[in-house]
Image (cartoon, grey):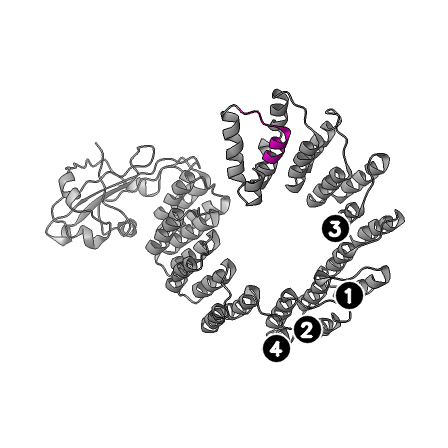
Amino acid sequence: MNTLIGKGKPHEAQAVFNNLTEEGHKPTLITYTTLVAALTRQKRFKSIPALLSKVADNGMKPDSILLNAMINAFSESGKVDEAMKIFQKMKEYGCKPTTSTYNTLIKGFGIAGRPYESMKLLEMMGQDENVKPNDRTYNILIQAWCTKKKLEEAWNVLHKMVASGIQPDVVTYNTMARAYAQNGETERAERLILKMPYNIVKPNERTCGIIISGYCKEGNMPEALRFLYRMKELGVDPNPVVFNSLIKGYLDTTDTNGVDEALTLMEEFGIKPDVVTFSTIMNAWSSAGLMENCEEIFNDMVKAGIEPDIHAYSILAKGYVRAGQPRKAEALLTSMSKYGVQPNVVIFTTIISGWCAAGKMDRAFRLCEKMHEMGTSPNLKTYETLIWGYGEAKQPWKAEELLTTMEERGVVPEMSTMQLVADAWRAIGLFKEANRILNGSEEESELDQEFDSDKIQVQSLESIYKKQKLSASPSNLLQIPDVVVTHPTRTTNGNIRCRMVVKLSDNMRNVTTSMFFVRTRSSYGVQPLIVSRQQIQNQVVRPFLDCCRVVSILC
């Protein structure tokens, strides 16, 4: 199980545990501890507390290792109150908390943005004879205060650290320096790290990277370059990370000569550009809309023997979509498979947005289906992108149908989703339909008000349909004289989703149509929509003809 977790396969580790118990094997405390690690990796924290009772049912008593693993799981997830409940049970089980236990809890409160409670735990450690704060304890506390931008409090902790006989280390200085740099005070951060040698602490690559990155973010490129040369005095060799920060800084200030200088310096220092270097430059060209330059850098990267990663492809996809070239963006999927890069939901959604912006909703929807087939589940952003696209294409009924698809695939729409569907209806002037979506109104559809009691007689031509699958476009409908076509389309619960009966005569001037759109009520409270109209010439119903499939009325 530990091997599987180490390989990033927590689901398989849990499956092994389940198989063991099903086969009658009795798990040990080590097995349960490993299971907690697997559940933590899967972020399935709700399943963890119940394990204590299972341990007791198997006639065992939790040890400190298992309890610490549980505390760590909840602390890492920010559920520090749950972690404290486990901490309080340690005494009940006769387990003594260690310094590591306290450090985990202190870190948990820091992640949760509650450093004051972290300080209370430090006080508790002082009252516990069995534990003593160490350098990690103080560094975690300093990080918690720096995250809240409370640098005075961070300094107070540092002074307590020194008073307790523990000297600040490189982690301490890096934490403080990063806080100053993030606050736009990189000069002060540099002054701080220059004191490190006096405390017999040597700066490392990360220390210097913090300073150079800070100056670059401030747009102060001369100071960033100056510090690059000063790294030699500090006994630290520049690495690709430092140069990538420098290149990005020059790009952000649109200094192409500076970029050339940084690349030349990389050669002088014997440092080869990596995928981040190339991606940083690609992103600059892509953002400027210069996709030919972006492609050139991508090709240079490949020629240099550096395999592109998901980020490099994301930059290309985004650039092509911005340039109105969704076809090129989608072609990247083939290139990605060549290098063994699995497309993620971000790339798929980016390409889908390109097809939506181009008004090619059939391509957008097909790609969404392909995405699902390839094992990448569309998320809320994906569906909202499609809904927006259908709204732009004046096809609100298709936008609304996606709510059902989302429900079937376990994606919960938010208020923004419903607003997009409502906007789609509003775009074609149907404000009542928009209100129905937003309010889950029980009032009948705006279009249904014109429905009369005409009885439509339907003839089944199932045999004709079997020979000919008809699409919904008006051109296809007009190819079928004097017939009524039937084809049942159902939702998963067996209800008819939409119905349409088309009767055409030889004389095109006498074409009449009766249509029904019946959507079953979804769990999101949207009232079923019924659309009807006899005369095809009517402007309200006409837009619907472009999208409807020819289906049957089930008698």
* Depicted 428 relative to depicted 435: above or below: below
For label 4, count other residues whose C-alpha is less than 10 Å away and answer few (under 14), some (14-19) or many (20+).
few
The N terminus lies in quadrant: top right
**Residue 511 image point, x, y percent:** 16, 50
> Which residue shows up at 47% across the image and 61% down it?
313
**Residue 503 image point, x, y percent:** 16, 45
**Label 4 sits on what residue type?**
Thr
- Give the labeled residue for mark 3: 143
In this picture, residue 84 sits left or right of residue 30: right
- Give the labeled residue for mark 1: 190
**Residue 532 image point, x, y percent:** 27, 42
Say if mark 1 contacts mark 2, CB within 8 Å: no
Q: Nearer the viewer, mark 3 or mark 4?
A: 4
- Give the labeled residue for mark 2: 221
> Which residue shows up at 39% across the image and 53% down it?
391
Q: Is residue 386 visible?
A: yes
Q: Which residues are magenta?
A: 25-35
Q: Is residue 484 visible?
A: no
Say if mark 1 contacts mark 4, CB within 8 Å: no
Q: Give 164 or 64, whichever is nearer the viewer.
A: 64
Task: Mark 1 or mark 2: name the one nearer the start of the chain.
Answer: 1
For label 2, count other residues whose C-alpha is less than 10 Å away and answer few (under 14), some (14-19) or many (20+).
many
Q: Quadrant of residue 495?
A: top left
Q: What is the distance, in whole Å, between disc 3 and disc 2 at their CAs?
A: 28 Å
Give the farthest residue toward the left. 506
Give the farthest residue toward the bottom. 257
Q: What is the distance, in whole Å, between disc 1 and disc 2 at their CAs?
A: 15 Å
Which element carries disc 4, helix, strand or loop?
helix
- Give the labeled residue for mark 4: 264
For label 1, count other residues whose C-alpha is less than 10 Å away and answer few (under 14), some (14-19) or many (20+).
many
Task: Report the predominant secondary structure element of the magenta stretch.
Answer: helix
